[in-house]
Image: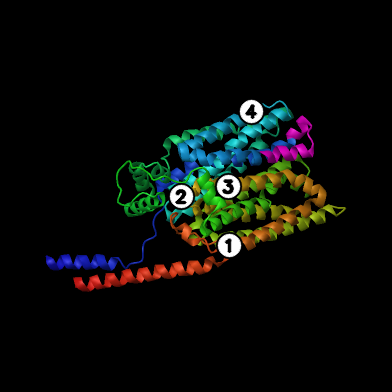
Amino acid sequence: MADEKLTQIARNRIQDFDPPKKPKTNKYAIACSFLASLASILLGYDIGVMSGAIIYIKKDLHISDIQVEILVGILNVYSLFGSAAAGRTSDWIGRRYTMVVAAAIFFAGALLMGFATNYAFLMVGRFVAGVGVGYALMVAPVYTAEVSPASSRGFLTSFPEVFINGGILLGYVSNVAFSKLATNLSWRFMLGIGAIPSVFLALSVLAMPESPRWLVMQGRLGDAKKVLDKTSNSLQEAELRLADIKQAAGIPENCCDDIVEVPKRPKGDSVWKELIFSPTPAVRHILITGVGIHFFQQASGIDAVVLYSPRIFEKAGIKSDHDKLLCTVAVGFVKTMFILVATFMLDKSGRRPLLLTSVGGMVASLVLLATGLTIIENSDHKLTWAIALCIAMVLAYVALFSIGMGPITWVYSSEIFPLRLRATGCSIGVAANRVTSGVVSMTFLSLEKAITIGGAFFLYAGLAAAAWVFFFTLMPETQGKTLEEMEASFGTFWNWRKTAREMREMRMTEKNRNDNNGQVQMGTVN
């Protein structure tokens, strides 16, 4: 009997040296991330539907190109108010109920736009909807990152970008569906129907738990542990995640009460001081990369392509409004299909390889698109091959954007900020994203007139090339790291590779030490 017991102990020790099995993706965490990401449909639908609705708004309200630019792009500026308030709101009432706030505001905005009687009324609706979009853009990636286990965080935190693309596709389909109505009704139905996704978002909150990190910040350790037990791949992982969050929140490791007193954390001016005015090298590095990736995502011209795709196809030689809208549906379909591909590659390939491949391909497709449009514009007869090239490059550009730059922006920025600064840091990143998007969308038509449409896309290609250099130089890989150990990867800026090597060496040393201890214990058993 004793021999059998010793044999079983030895067998268990040997199993400790087996390669670890790949953890299965937690279905409960998937469901939570799925429901939270419904918030991102709000932005996607507005982007997609406005690209077609503006054709009919211009005819019905008789507005100029400048007014078109402002109407299309101003929602991004208005969303700053929402994203600025969302950080404080989500820290105050929690991530879940902040999503309800986002849904309610966007619902009101969609109805206002649908019932608008003139340009000024329409702008009021854009303001209200923009605030709702700002709330949704900030809170969905943060919630998803905080509820996800490290092994599948890339997959799950890419969900918001998936739903943005799904929303864009729905907007394009809505354009085609209502395009046959009278001009004064078509655009009102296109915009007003956007109230429906916000209702589903508000109802989804009933099935979602609160973020475990927010619960710990409120001292509700018992509730946080229940959520972590459900969203982790094992109870051991749940305990490790809870310990990491407690450490980040300043709660003693041996404190296991359900309700605890949380040490005072930086709030208000202290958070801004730690982020902006006197940051540590690590926080400064995190802020630069977090804001930089949001800036370059939009500066590379994605909103110009998505919002003005009917205009681009018109310049490429497609004249019928219905045909232009059908082409935009193809853009939305390709964009959505490739974002689905990206979700399954993020945790296998890592953030950096996908991002650098994506941006490099975007540079090439933008250069070819600009070349094709320039040739068409300077030709006095129809060039079928150039038209085909332009259409192919638009589709290639959105596909390449979707496999890397699109989802990784939200994944990366939501996982690199420390817990104490995460809500505010993500709000700053979203603000940079929306400002840049607003500038791009509100200047495209003017830029086209000033330097031609081909020149505009050459400019975006140059900015995308600058983005590639920025990412290659300054952005460490974050795949597989817990949110609480992320800060250690930053702080050395362009020397981050040296830091990463040192961290790997430390892990290998620790692993070897543990292996040696295990071998000594095996010898004792034998």
What residue does disc 4 label?
Answer: 112
Percent across and percent down for residue 470 are 62, 61
Label 1 or label 2, whichever comes before in sequence order: 2
- The residue lying toward the viewer, choosing from 334 and 17, is 17
- In the displayed structure, would residue 361 be above or below residue 61? below
Instruction: Tell me which amino acid carries mark 2.
Output: Leu
Kindly identify the residue that appears in the image at 71 percent across and 59 percent down: 462
Cα distance between the residues tagged 3 and 1: 19 Å
Q: Mark 3 or 1 closer to N-term?
A: 3
Q: Name the residue under label 3.
A: 428
Is residue 72 in the magenta section?
yes
Give the label, 3 or 4, closer to the camera.
3
Q: Is disc 4 in contact with disc 1, using a CB cutoff of under 8 Å?
A: no
Q: Mark 1 points at which residue?
A: 474
Left or right side of 187 for 21:
left
**C-alpha span from label 3 to label 4:** 28 Å
Estimate how packed mark 3 is, as few (under 14), some (14 to 19) or many (20 or more) residues with alpha carbons within 10 Å.
Answer: many
Q: Disc 4 marks which amino acid?
A: Leu
Q: Residue 416 carries which label?
A: none
Q: Distance between the residues labelled 4 and 1?
A: 43 Å
Q: Which of marks 2 and 4 is nearer the N terminus?
A: 4
Residue with the mark numbered 2: 419
- Magenta residues, start to end: 56-74
What amino acid type is highlighted by mark number 1? Leu
- First in sequence: mark 3 vs mark 2: 2
Foreground tag (4 vs 1): 1
